[in-house]
């Protein structure tokens, strides 16, 4: 019992982070309707800022750096400046990204917030380098800010700092809740969540109210993570960035409206995770469940919360649900299909070594990106689990080929069907929720799969998850032969499989199934009224997408000879979504561009081998993603509204009968 | 009606959607303390005229002047300068209480004056607006807009979804508002008789253009003229 109390209190440190990030997510959702996946990244910059200031007084900026004083800065000035950096990043995100997207469809906003998240995460190692800091970044640690005193309570040793963190989280949540409840600006912010236009008619600027909330939440998120960093340890960019997942879980428990519930759930989640961590050390705890349990809890919470509360989560009044990216229904033209396949075959023959390997990786990524096109671009289901499906298939392939000895291609099919089954399970929440909430559920699922399956030592032997080379009728299709990094036979096998599947997907999308997908994307109720079985179509979409991703995962596995968990992380999944969105998430040709630009694809090789900009790859991809969504957004149509108004002001009036003829068609 | 007393002057206003005009060359003048009924069949451009005048839609041409000052820029600025619009959905916030709705008006003396004018709202202060009847919501919409001290009040489809009893309660309040406070009111209405009963002047729009202007009292007597205007006969 003493141990449980002790671990529960230890959990307040991470719990306080979840609580404040969750309260911030709720506040931003109320103020803008955006679910901000970048909340953890904003706080991450603040932590690094404080570490830099307290090491040698250097203030690192996105461009350049400023030396403040001659040595390490004192604790509280550094903490204030660090938290202020969170405020500045939050405001910049609002002004440059989310404000222009305030009437964009949810997909655009989700992609934008993922873009901001990746951008900051990629920028930190580039900016906080040895030159700027005057010391090696690896030597930086988050120095303590709170007291190190402890006391004993009922036999349990309690750190005062953990109680201070919990109190700080509760204080911040009370302040935010009080703002919304008792101040006129807060009431106006709540009103804007319901009807932005009516609020403007009362003389308020929803943008200014939103800016205030972005700045405030950036500050408090930075502050709590700075205070908690010494307790939760290290400066690893990825782990801080992904703190947003449990924070999203607790925000959903609060129905994205209750700051108090989100705060309480955050503190409770932190404690539960620590208690689970303690329990996994017990002899009676199953060995297969020792790793990743803590990361699986948020997914369970998300699924339960969405099932219980999904329809009770209010949507923003200003969003124009009809403004979606136009889709071009694909048509199979023999020449246009054969030419790229033949061109790729020639490229395979003409290349060798690393270049051919990257070309084949691009082909495989094209297939995985096609699954994103199908599920997100065509069916409108924002799923962030694509690489988890691919990894699950690769994992199953390893077991099937090494443990059971299932031959190729049956092993690959069975592995892909395993991913399909997983896809259907992950797709079940989509029957009840949609949009950004589904994105939250799927990123939580991806993180749970990554921690519980890919990084679970109990499920991975010390030798790694080996994958037997494929062969067909005694003819080896192995990726390597002698010193050859990648054989022609393997390359052509990948090309044939991907080409056949892409042709099948194109046929499917151009037919009745594709039309049903588009109907569901456009308006689920109208689709149901027209006789479309919406749940079946959604599950079919998840099944097909996970099958395609699963085949892609198997091909990645074959190309390595063993399964590498690093190939299927949440971050890689987000990068695939980013490149697919940049390419064009509604077209198969967009998937091809995504394949070329995706992680370890041809563009990546050019960055690393030819122009030596490999370190900037993620940053450039994230920047391209943000530019694509903010400046060249697909949902806006060919001509922006302001240009149409200017044109109309210059040209004579048109007859009113033309008014509806000019409306942009969703499907062309 | 002389030029010096015009609280609202709209000259050559054109506006529309995605650059396609829905109203063209609209000219309207409303004197302080008078009510103008804006009539016309569905799609005539009545709501578009109000939305463009209030700054919710970018004008493709023309000018709007409220109380002598040109209305330019954002709708927030127009509201703060005394040109207020009550939209057809009433613009009340259903998840907020009546008190919170009134508090939004940033009135210096609190929302007491609104309750003095509409005492029916006093017992409802702590009730969520979504639980009010349509008539109560419309009263609240007018009350919270009055706290903004409008010099020009634009009301879109005031009677939509309201019972005849509720309409009969609200129309005299508008007349009082014009007579006692000197507010200029533009009332978009589908119920011609009710609009003409309270208005001083009426305008009929058809296909985005003004086709009839006249004193409300005269038009009440000559329904044929309005009927012809609804079918597009221009008799300005």
Image (cartoon, rainbow, N blue to C red):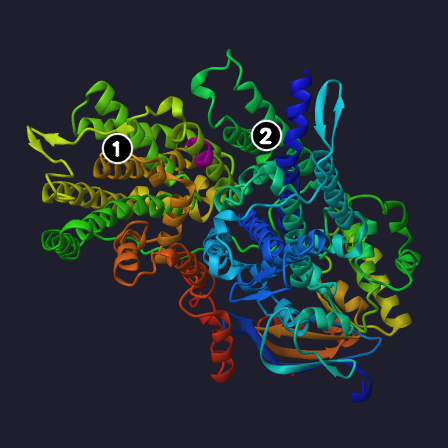
In the picture, measured across the screen, residue A383 lies left or right of residue A218, that is left
Report the residue at 78% width, 88% height from top.
B3
Against A211, residue A294 (above or below) is above
Q: Quadrant of the C terminus of chain A?
A: bottom left
- Neighbours of disc 1 within 10 Å: few (<14), some (14-19), many (20+): many
Per the image, is A252 magenta? Answer: no
> Nearer the N terminus, badge 1 or badge 2?
2
Alpha carbon distance from label 1 to label 2: 40 Å
Circle count:
2
Q: Is residue B228 visible?
A: no
Q: Which mark is residue A209?
A: none
| Residue on which the image places disc 2 | A308
Q: Quadrant of the N terminus of chain A?
A: top right
In the picture, measured across the screen, residue A627 lies left or right of residue A480, that is right
| Residue on which the image places disc 1 | A562
Which secondary structure, mark 1? strand
Mark 1 vs mark 2, foreground winner is: 1
The image quarter containing residue A164 is: top right
Residue segment shown in magenta: A445-449
Q: Position of residue B127 (x, y in %)?
A: 81, 43
Between residues B230 and B179, which one lies in front from this camera angle? B179
Q: Position of residue A58 (x, y in %)?
A: 59, 61
Chain letter of mark 2 equals A
Between residues B4 and A546, which one lies in front from this camera angle? A546
Most common secondary structure along the magenta stretch: helix
Against B8, residue A389 (above or below) is above
């Amino acid at each position: 019992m003493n141990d449980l109390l002790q671990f529960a209190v230890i959990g307040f440190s991470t719990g306080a982070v979840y609580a404040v990030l969750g309260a911030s997510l709720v506040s931003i959702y109320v103020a803008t309707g955006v679910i901000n996946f970048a909340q953890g990244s904003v706080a991450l910059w603040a932590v690094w800022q404080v570490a830099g200031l307290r090491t040698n007084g250097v203030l690192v900026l996105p461009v350049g750096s400023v030396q403040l004083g001659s040595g390490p800065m004192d604790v509280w000035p550094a903490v204030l400046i660090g938290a202020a950096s969170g405020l500045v990043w939050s405001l910049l995100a609002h002004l440059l990204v989310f404000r222009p997207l305030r009437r964009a469809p949810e997909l655009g906003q989700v992609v934008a917030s993922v873009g901001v998240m990746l951008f900051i995460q990629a920028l930190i190692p580039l900016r906080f380098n040895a030159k700027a800091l005057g010391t090696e970044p690896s030597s930086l640690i988050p120095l303590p800010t709170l007291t190190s005193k402890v006391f004993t309570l009922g036999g349990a040793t309690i750190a005062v700092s953990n109680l201070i963190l919990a109190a700080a989280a509760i204080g911040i949540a009370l302040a935010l809740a009080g703002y919304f409840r008792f101040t006129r600006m807060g009431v106006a912010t709540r009103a804007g969540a319901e009807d932005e236009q009516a609020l403007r008619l009362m003389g308020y600027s929803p943008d200014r109210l939103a800016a205030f909330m972005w700045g405030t939440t950036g500050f408090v998120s930075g502050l709590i993570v700075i205070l908690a960093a010494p307790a939760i340890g290290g400066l690893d960019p990825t782990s801080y960035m992904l703190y947003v997942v449990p924070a999203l879980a607790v925000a959903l428990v609060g129905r994205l409206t209750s700051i108090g519930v989100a705060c309480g759930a955050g503190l409770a989640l932190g404690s539960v995770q620590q208690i689970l961590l303690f329990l996994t050390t017990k002899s009676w705890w199953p060995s297969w469940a020792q790793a990743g349990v803590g990361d699986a809890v948020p997914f369970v919470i998300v699924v339960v919360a969405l099932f219980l509360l999904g329809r009770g989560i209010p949507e923003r009044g200003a969003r124009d649900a009809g403004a979606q990216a136009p889709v071009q229904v694909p048509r199979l033209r023999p020449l246009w299909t054969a030419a790229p396949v033949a061109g790729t075959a020639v490229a395979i023959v003409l290349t060798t070594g690393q270049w051919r390997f990257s070309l084949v990786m691009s082909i495989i990524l094209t297939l995985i990106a096609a699954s994103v096109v199908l599920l997100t671009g065509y069916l409108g289901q924002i799923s962030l689990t694509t690489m988890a499906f691919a990894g699950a298939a690769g994992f199953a392939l390893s077991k099937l080929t090494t443990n059971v000895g299932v031959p190729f291609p049956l092993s690959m099919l069975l592995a892909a069907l395993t991913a399909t089954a997983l896809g259907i399970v992950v797709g079940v929440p989509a029957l009840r929720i949609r949009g950004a909430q589904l994105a939250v559920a799927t990123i939580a699922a991806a993180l749970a799969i990554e921690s519980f399956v890919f990084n679970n030592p109990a499920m991975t032997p010390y030798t790694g998850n080996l994958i037997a080379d494929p062969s067909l009728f005694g003819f080896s299709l192995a990726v390597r032969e002698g010193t050859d990094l990648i054989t022609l036979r393997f390359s052509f096998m990948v090309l044939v499989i991907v080409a056949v599947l892409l042709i099948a997907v194109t046929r499917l999308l151009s037919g009745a199934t594709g039309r049903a997908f588009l109907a569901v994307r456009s308006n689920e109720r109208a689709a149901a009224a027209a006789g479309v079985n919406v749940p079946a179509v959604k599950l079919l979409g998840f099944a097909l997408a996970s099958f395609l991703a699963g085949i892609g995962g198997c091909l990645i596995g074959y190309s390595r000879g063993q399964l590498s968990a690093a190939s299927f992380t949440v971050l890689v999944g987000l990068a695939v979504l980013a490149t697919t969105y940049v390419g064009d998430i509604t077209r198969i040709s967009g998937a091809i561009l995504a394949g070329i630009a995706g992680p370890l694809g041809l563009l990546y090789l050019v960055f690393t081998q030819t122009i030596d900009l490999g370190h900037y790859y993620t940053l450039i991809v994230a920047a391209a993603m943000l530019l694509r969504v903010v400046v060249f957004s697909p949902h806006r149509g060919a001509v922006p509204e302001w240009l149409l108004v200017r044109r109309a002001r210059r040209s004579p009036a048109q007859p009113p009968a033309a008014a509806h003829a000019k409306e942009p068609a969703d499907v062309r | 009606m002389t030029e010096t007393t015009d609280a609202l002057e709209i000259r050559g206003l054109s506006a529309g959607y995605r650059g396609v005009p829905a109203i063209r060359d609209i000219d309207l003048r409303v004197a302080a303390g008078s009510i103008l009924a804006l009539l016309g069949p569905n799609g005539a451009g009545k709501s578009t005229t109000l939305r463009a005048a209030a700054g919710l839609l970018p004008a493709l041409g023309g000018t709007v002047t409220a109380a002598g000052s040109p209305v330019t820029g954002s709708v927030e600025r127009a509201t703060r300068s005394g040109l207020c619009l009550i939209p057809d959905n009433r613009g009340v916030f259903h998840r907020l209480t009546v008190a919170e709705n009134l508090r939004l008006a940033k009135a210096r003396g609190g929302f007491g004056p609104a309750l003095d004018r509409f005492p029916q709202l006093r017992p409802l202060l702590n009730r969520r607006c979504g639980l009010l009847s349509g008539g109560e919501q419309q009263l609240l919409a007018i009350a919270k807009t009055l706290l903004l001290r409008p010099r020009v009040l634009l009301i879109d489809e005031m009677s939509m979804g309201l019972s005849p009893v509720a309409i009969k309660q609200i129309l005299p309040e508008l007349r009082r508002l014009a007579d006692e406070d000197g507010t200029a009111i533009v009332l978009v209405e589908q119920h011609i008789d009710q609009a003409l009963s309270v208005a001083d002047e009426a305008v009929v729009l058809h296909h985005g253009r003004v086709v009839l202007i006249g004193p409300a009292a005269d038009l009440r007597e000559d329904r044929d003229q309005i009927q012809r205007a609804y079918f597009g006969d221009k008799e300005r």
